[in-house]
Image: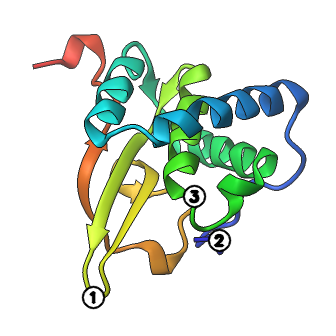
Amino acid sequence: MTAPTEPEPAGPVPPLRRLLARLAVALARPLAAARPHRIRTVLHLLRRGAVPATRQQVAAARHAVVTVSPRCAAGRSCLQRSLATALLCRAQGTWPTWCTGVRTGPFRAHAWVAVGSEPVGEPAHEHGYTPVITVPPLPPAGRRP
């Protein structure tokens, strides 16, 4: 989980974005300890009013999160990292697709953010999960069924 398949945005994180990233990481930690139903409910509420995030916006948010948090940069904190990335995107008015999933052979669970169905910033060995919970952006108000 630490070797991305595409280059992460390079360079320092601006001070305001760094502050927002630290706040997102702090808020993501207790949320990551919640039950899956609670996480999904919170994320469904938070995505309201946000526009779909672009791949560049999600990559920049993920970069900021892993820059300010060694825990999120480590491979075993995918849930907190994905939640913090989604929260940071939301703080800037956008929403990625937040996902959790599983795979077999060997069994593993993982959490990530994506644009559409494409994971952002995930290494190749972390692909191939079957999504279990996804929280995509809401369609624009005029396009809702």
> Considering the numbered disc 3 on the image, is that residue within a helix, a strand or a loop?
loop
Q: Give the SS element for disc 1.
A: loop
Q: How crowded is mark 1: few (under 14 residues within 10 Å), some or many (20 or more)?
A: few
Label number found at residue 105: 1
Label 2 SS: loop
Q: Badge 2 local density, few (<14 within 10 Å), some, or many (20+)?
A: some
Task: Say which residue label 2 marks.
Answer: 2
Instruction: Specify whether 41 is left or right of 85.
Output: left
Disc 3 marks a residue whose amino acid type is: Ser
| Residue 103 drawn at (x, y percent) | 28, 74
Q: Give the residue displayed 30% in from the left and 42% down from the top.
A: 36
Occupied quadrant, residue 16:
top right
Q: In which quarter of the image is the C terminus?
A: top left
Q: State the mark number for residue 77.
A: 3
Instruction: Locate the N terminus by quadrant.
Output: bottom right
Residue that protrudes farthest toward the left in the picture? 145
Residue in view at x 57 percent, y 58 percent: 77
User: Does 138 sit above or below residue 131?
Assistant: above
Question: Is 50 above or below relative to 63?
Answer: above
Q: Quote the CA–CA distance across marks 3 and 1.
A: 21 Å
